Image (cartoon, rainbow, N blue to C red):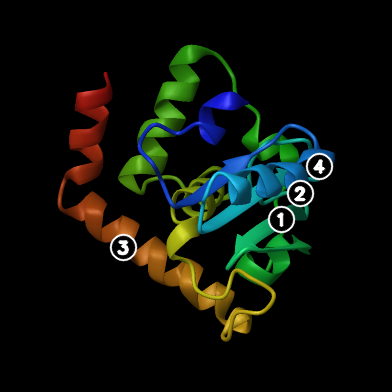
């Protein structure tokens, strides 16, 4: 848990997942004390330590020195929730295939949506309760999905797979 808090890159904006919903506000407070300007500390109600697509996500948002905590419902973003079983991994070979399919745009559904949600969180408009345009979350997700698809079309997803192999 210390890694994200002591980020040597000096990030001023972060998305951090925690294993316990009771930690979201505490982490936001620590980040505020460390000088972070904007942060989203998240915990999925399904037990995931990230924003989730199967249930609500508890979010403690740090913005301009203030911390606000709220729940984000995947219905607001995607118009649906997904069964937790859709995210369950299998053996290494199957997981590698799922990862490749998600990154290449060949897989839709829960695995794809959770990657879009977490990878593009910082660029989604209207994440915070007080942000103008909060009701435009779904268009932000759609915009980020299109950007991911453009990256796949240009071969950047495959390049990342080769680099990380």
Circles 3, 2 touching at the beta carbon (< 8 Å): no
At 70% from the left edge and 48% from the top edge, which residue is drawn?
29
User: Disc 2 designates what residue?
Assistant: 25
Look at the numbered discs 1 and 2 and tell me whether their residues touch, using CB distance below 8 Å: yes
Identify the residue at horizontal 59%, vertical 69% (top origin): 127
Vertical side of 12 occupied by 102: above or below: above
Looking at the picture, how far across and down is residue 70, in whole percent? Answer: 78, 63
Residue denoted by label 3: 147
Picture quadrant where residue 158 is located: top left
Element class at badge 1? strand
Read off the residue under disc 1.
60
Q: Where the C terminus falls, by quadrant?
A: top left
Q: Residue furthest right?
A: 22
Which residue occupies the foreground of this view, 64 or 61? Answer: 64
Distance from the alpha carbon under mark 4 to that under mark 1: 9 Å
Of tags 3 and 1, the one toward the viewer is: 1
Q: Secondary structure at mark 2?
A: helix
Can you tell which of label 3 and label 4 is closer to the viewer? 4
Label 4 secondary element: helix
Sequence-earlier tag: 4 or 1: 4
Left or right for 154, reference 75:
left
Cα separation, mark 3 vs mark 2, equals 31 Å
State the residue position of label 4.
21
- Work out how far the residue at label 4 is from the one at label 2, CA to CA, in angstroms: 9 Å
Question: In terms of depth relative to the viewer, which is nearer, 6 or 162?
Answer: 6
Q: Rounded to the nearest whole Å, what is the CA distance between mark 1 and mark 2?
A: 6 Å
First in sequence, mark 1 or 2: give its number: 2
How would you rate the neighbour count of disc 1 (Cα within 10 Å): few for under 14, some for 14-19, many for 20 or more?
many
Name the front one of labels 3 and 2: 2
The answer to whether one can see residue 42 in this image is: no
């Amino acid at each position: 848990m210390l890694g994200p808090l002591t980020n040597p890159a000096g990030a001023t904006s972060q998305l951090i997942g925690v294993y316990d919903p009771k930690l979201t506000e505490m982490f936001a407070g620590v980040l505020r004390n460390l000088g972070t300007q904007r942060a989203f500390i998240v915990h999925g109600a399904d037990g995931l330590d990230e924003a989730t697509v199967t249930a609500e996500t508890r979010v403690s948002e740090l913005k301009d020195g203030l911390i606000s905590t709220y729940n984000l419902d995947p219905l607001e973003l995607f118009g649906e929730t997904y069964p937790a079983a859709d995210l369950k991994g299998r053996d290494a070979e199957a997981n590698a295939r799922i990862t490749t399919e998600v990154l290449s745009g060949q897989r839709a559904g829960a695995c794809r949506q959770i990657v879009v949600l977490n990878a593009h969180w910082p660029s989604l408009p209207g994440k915070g309760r007080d942000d103008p345009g909060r009701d435009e979350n779904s268009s932000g997700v759609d915009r980020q999905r299109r950007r991911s698809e453009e990256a796949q079309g240009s071969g950047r997803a495959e390049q990342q797979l080769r680099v990380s192999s």
